[in-house]
C-alpha cells in the first residue's frame, strides 16, 4: 500500500491537469435526435451529470469543440454508424437513462454523461447510464491496438524508434530516435503512460498507419461492437470517431482475459530504456485508481478536448473483479478515477449474480436464420449486428404440406415396425410349440 501511495504522489507531481470542457444538459425529447447545441467553453462548470433519458447521443457524439473532426480536403464527412435494431446486452441496454440492479445506489457526485459497471469474469452488467450512446473514447481506445499487437507481434521483437514516432502529437512515453525497444516495452508505454509515440512505433510494425487502423476496426467488429468506429488508433479525435460504454465493456472484458494485458495495466511502474544518448528512466502507471486503491487492478485513462475525460478502472475484492467505464466526464465532482471508484463501491453492495444485462455480443446468425414475424406482418431475420434484414420473399423450407407428409411417413414406419415385431413373436411361439410336441 505504501508503494502505491508513493507512486500516486510521484505521478501527481508529474502529470499536468488539462483544461476542462463541459456540455449543457440536453432536453428530454423522448426521440432519437442529434443535438446541435453549441459547445460550452472550457471555463464552464458541470455541477451534475447531463440528462440522457431522451437518447440525445444515439447516433453521433456531441458536437466537437475544435476542428479535429473536419475531414481532409476533398473527403466527405463519414456517415453515422447505423443504430442496431437489437442492442447487444439485453433489453435494459436499450435504455438511455440510468438503469441499475436492485441494491445499487447511484453516487451523487458524478458528472459523467455515460458509464457502465460490470463483472469482468461473468459479464454481468450491474448498472449503466446510456450504455449504447455514442461518445468519443480518447486514449482508452488504445486497448484495441494492444489486443491487435498481442495477437500479431512477439513480445521480444526489437523495434527501432523513428523520428516520426518520437515526435508524435499528444501524450508520449518518451521514445527517442534510434532507441531500441521490445514490443513488450512499447505496450507498457502504450498502456501505462498512454504513449502516442509507442502507439505509432507499434503501428509501423503492424504494417503502417492505414493498415493498423483497418486492423483495430476489424478487431472491434469481431468483438461484436455496434457503436465503435476508430478514426485514430491513438485515440486522438478524428472524423467519425465514436464508441459506447457497452462496446468498451466488450473490448475491455476481452482485453483483461489476456494475462499480458492484465499484468501490464496492474503494474505500478517499470524501468524504461533511453536511447543512444539518453539514460533510461522509470515509467509510472497514470491510473490513479491502481495507485490509490489497494484493490485496484488497473485500467486506462483518456482525455481530448472533444472527448473530455474518459476512464476505465477495475477492482478485485475477494476474487470478484468489477470494472467501470466512464465517458465524457469532468473533474467538477472529483477526478475520473474517483468517480469510477464510487461506482465500483456501489456495485460491490449488489450481491454477486444480480444483473440487468450481460456483456456479450449478439449471437452469430447461421446461414439460414430463423425468421420472426413483425407487427406489420413482414418477415425479419436478426443479423449479427442486431439490425433487421427483410427476408419476406424467401422460401419457407418447413411448409405445412411438407410437415404433414413427414408426419404421415413416420407413422407408417412405426406401424410397420410394430407389426414386424408381433409377427416375429408369433413365429417364435409356433417353433417352440413344435419342439414341445416332439
Image: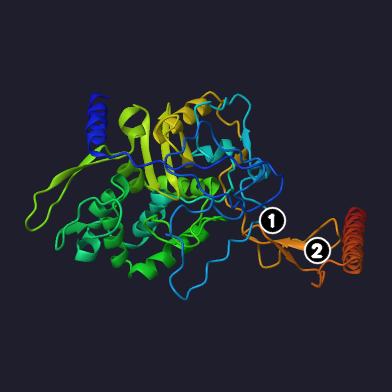
Q: Is residue 136 left or right of residue 358?
A: left
Q: Position of residue 49 (x, y in %)?
A: 54, 35
Identify which residue, 437 or 358, lies in the foreground: 358
Q: Residue at x 53, y 26 (%)?
A: 107
User: Which residue is at the far left?
Assistant: 277
Q: Position of residue 300 (x, y in %)?
A: 37, 43
Q: Residue 391 is drawn in which quadrant?
A: bottom right
Identify which residue, 416 or 360, lies in the foreground: 360
Of the two numbered discs 2 and 1 in the rendering, the one whose residue sits closer to the viewer: 1
**Residue 162 visible in rendering:** no
Q: Is residue 208 left or right of residue 358?
A: left
Q: Secondary structure at mark 2?
A: strand
Identify which residue, 17 or 185, lies in the foreground: 17
N-terminal of the two: label 2 or label 1?
Answer: 1
Residue at mark 2: 379
User: Could you tell me which quadrant the N terminus lies in?
Assistant: top left
**Residue 75 visible in rendering:** yes
Q: Position of residue 74 (x, y in %)?
A: 47, 76
Amino acid at each position: 500500500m505504501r508503494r502505491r501511495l508513493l507512486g500516486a504522489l510521484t505521478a501527481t507531481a508529474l502529470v499536468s491537469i488539462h483544461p476542462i470542457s463541459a456540455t449543457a444538459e440536453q432536453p428530454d425529447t423522448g426521440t432519437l435526435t442529434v443535438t446541435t447545441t453549441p459547445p460550452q467553453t472550457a471555463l464552464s462548470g458541470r455541477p451534475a451529470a447531463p440528462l440522457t433519458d431522451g437518447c440525445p447521443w444515439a447516433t453521433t457524439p456531441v458536437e466537437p469543440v475544435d476542428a479535429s473532426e473536419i475531414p481532409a480536403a476533398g473527403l466527405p464527412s463519414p456517415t453515422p454508424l447505423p443504430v442496431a435494431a437489437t442492442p447487444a446486452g439485453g433489453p435494459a441496454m436499450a435504455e438511455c437513462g440510468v438503469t441499475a440492479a436492485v441494491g445499487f445506489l447511484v453516487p451523487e457526485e458524478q458528472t459523467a454523461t455515460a458509464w457502465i459497471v460490470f463483472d469482468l469474469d461473468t459479464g454481468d452488467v450491474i448498472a449503466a447510464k446510456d450504455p449504447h450512446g455514442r461518445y468519443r473514447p480518447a486514449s482508452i481506445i488504445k486497448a484495441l491496438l494492444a489486443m491487435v499487437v498481442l495477437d500479431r507481434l512477439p513480445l521480444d521483437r526489437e523495434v527501432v524508434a523513428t523520428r516520426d514516432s518520437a515526435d508524435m502529437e499528444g501524450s508520449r512515453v518518451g521514445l527517442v530516435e534510434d532507441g531500441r525497444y521490445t514490443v513488450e516495452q512499447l505496450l507498457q508505454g502504450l498502456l501505462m503512460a498512454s504513449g502516442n509515440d509507442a502507439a505509432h512505433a507499434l503501428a509501423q510494425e503492424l504494417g503502417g498507419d492505414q493498415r493498423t487502423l483497418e486492423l483495430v476496426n476489424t478487431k472491434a467488429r469481431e468483438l461484436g461492437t455496434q457503436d465503435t468506429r476508430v478514426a485514430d488508433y491513438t485515440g486522438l479525435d478524428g472524423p467519425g470517431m465514436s464508441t459506447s460504454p457497452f462496446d468498451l465493456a466488450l473490448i475491455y472484458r476481452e482485453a483483461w482475459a489476456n494475462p499480458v494485458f492484465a499484468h501490464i495495466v496492474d503494474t505500478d511502474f517499470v524501468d524504461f530504456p533511453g536511447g543512444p544518448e539518453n539514460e533510461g528512466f522509470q515509467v509510472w502507471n497514470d491510473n490513479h485508481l491502481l495507485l490509490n486503491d489497494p484493490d485496484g487492478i488497473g485500467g486506462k485513462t483518456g482525455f481530448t478536448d472533444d472527448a473530455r475525460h474518459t476512464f476505465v478502472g477495475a477492482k478485485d475484492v475477494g476474487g470478484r473483479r468489477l470494472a467501470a467505464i466512464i465517458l465524457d466526464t469532468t473533474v467538477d465532482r472529483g477526478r475520473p478515477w474517483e468517480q469510477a471508484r464510487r461506482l465500483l463501491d456501489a456495485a460491490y453492495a449488489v450481491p454477486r449474480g444480480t444483473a440487468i444485462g450481460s456483456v456479450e455480443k449478439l449471437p452469430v446468425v447461421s446461414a439460414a436464420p430463423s425468421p420472426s414475424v413483425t407487427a406489420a406482418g413482414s418477415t425479419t431475420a436478426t443479423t449479427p449486428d442486431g439490425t433487421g434484414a427483410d427476408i419476406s420473399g424467401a422460401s419457407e423450407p418447413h411448409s405445412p404440406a411438407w410437415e404433414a407428409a413427414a408426419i404421415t411417413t413416420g407413422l407408417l414406419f412405426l406401424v410397420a415396425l410394430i407389426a414386424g415385431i408381433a409377427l416375429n413373436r408369433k413365429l417364435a411361439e409356433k417353433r417352440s410349440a413344435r419342439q414341445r410336441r416332439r
